[in-house]
Amino acid sequence: MSDVDRSSALAAALSDVLGGAAIDGVQRLSGGASRETWKFVADGRPLILQRQRDGDGRDMGVEVAVLRAASVGGVAVPELIATSADESVGSGPEHRVGAAFMILGHVDGETIARKILRDDTYAVARQHLTADCATALARLHAIDPSSAPGLLAVDQVEQYRSVLDTLDQPHPTFELAFRWLDAHRPEPGPMRIVHGDFRLGNLMVGPDGLRAVLDWELAHIGDPLEDLGWLCVRAWRFGSAKPVAGVGEYAELIDAYRSASGATVDAEAVRWWEVLGTLKWGIMCIIQLQAHLSGASRSHELAAIGRRVCETEYDLFLALEDRW
Amino acid sequence: MPHDAPSAQEMLAAVREWMERDLLAGTDGRLHFHTRVAINVLAMVERELELGPTQAIDHAERLAGLGFDDDRALAAAIRSGAVDDHPALAAHVRGEVLASVLDKLRVANPKYLIDGRG
């Protein structure tokens, strides 16, 4: 079914879920290779639908719980309007939308990294985006992990090594990086809720700065420094020379996080997590390619992501230069 | 070569140039983005047709020089620890692996290379 045909089918389903609201302007958005994101208007209010892709076995209810906990903890997140787990939307709403879903309030702003990094509109926001990110992460990491039940604590090195083996595409660079990670592992930090994909693209940014943290599907229990390291991965600088999200320096991020959280932060540990993040992104590129090759989601965009693996290998060599 | 002109590379270039010249301007949003991705994919295949045969020989020679049949065997040796038990060997392996990564980037995304570092 084309996107246009699916739009009209979705409009009927969304109206049903939202108590007969008038639905207009159903439109699929770019991005979101692991799930579909649509925007639409319900009775004049702009909303977002996130719909799980076929074959994705994750429980969206866990993500809903994290979103609620983050909101209570003072992290700016989109308003939760309805989910496929709500009893109030009637029995079997999944069948109407065709998969597990969340309907969220639309937050005005920009997620496209290249615009945030280059457009004059965001010049002021860029000056304090690093601090905004540090504050949001400090608030997230302060939340009691038991307030979002269902989150798993999985060792990221072991998880991704085993995922790579399942994918059966061995890469010598990845093995070199795994050896380095094993040999330089920092002391484990506290176990907290981590976002797991905190970077431009998943942050709604306005001219005034960070407005909302989006896309919580990779949230889990782990070391808070994982989120800081991930924000510094070279892929998430989108061509900028500045290491933190393309807008800030390492020291700015670490100082801002330290003052917002009161925690001590080992700069070398953040770099270790950045190396692991770079490796993870390389493996994720193969996972996204597999979604295409397996037929789960035929897409030349996903196919092309497979050829981004060598960018991450190059980034690993850059990150580890003189550190082997 | 059993085929007439144009070559596979020339046909890809013709389609890509048409997409850049006539198709791209008439699209916006998601379709515009996906048209750009398609143009990039065609350009990548053009580069692979040009550089691929030489790169395949170079890659095989690098692996043979290290004593491995393929990347799978090299990856397994690195994981076993056999490589970084010997610092000189480890440095040599890293150099050869990096050389192959740079070749892949020259096809996949040559703009990604930092000047002077590849």
Image: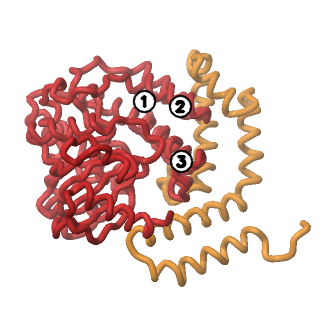
Chain colours: A red, B orange
Tally of marks = 3
Q: Which-is-in-front pick, marks 3 and 2?
A: 3
Q: Position of residue B36 (x, y in %)?
A: 49, 68
Verify CB contact (< 8 Å) between mark 3 and mark 2: no
Work out whether disc 3 and disc 2 sit on a shared chain.
Answer: yes
Residue type pointed to by label 1: Arg
Could you say which is closer to the camera, residue B71 or residue A77? A77
Measured along the vertical axis of the image, is residue B97 above or below residue A243? Answer: above
Find numbered disc 1 in the image and state the secondary structure of the residue it sits on.
loop
Q: Position of residue B45 (x, y in %)?
A: 65, 61
Residue type pointed to by label 3: Ala
Could you say which is closer to the camera, residue A163 or residue A92? A92
Q: Which-is-in-front pick, marks 1 and 2?
A: 2
Residue at 28% across / 28% down in the picture?
Answer: A151
Which chain's residue wears label 1? A
Quadrant assignment, res A36: bottom left
Could you say which is closer to the camera, residue A143 or residue A200? A143
On the image, numbered disc 2 is attached to which residue?
A164
Q: CA distance from mark 1 to mark 3?
A: 40 Å
Q: Position of residue A294 (x, y in %)?
A: 59, 45
**Mark with earlier residue (1, 2):** 2
Q: CA distance from mark 3 to mark 2?
A: 19 Å
Measured along the vertical axis of the image, is residue A86 above or below residue B115? Answer: above
**Mark with earlier residue (3, 2):** 2
Residue B60 visible in the shown view: yes
Image side of residue A89 versus residue B72, left or right? left
Residue at 71% across / 29% down in the picture?
Answer: B66
On the image, numbered disc 1 is attached to which residue?
A323
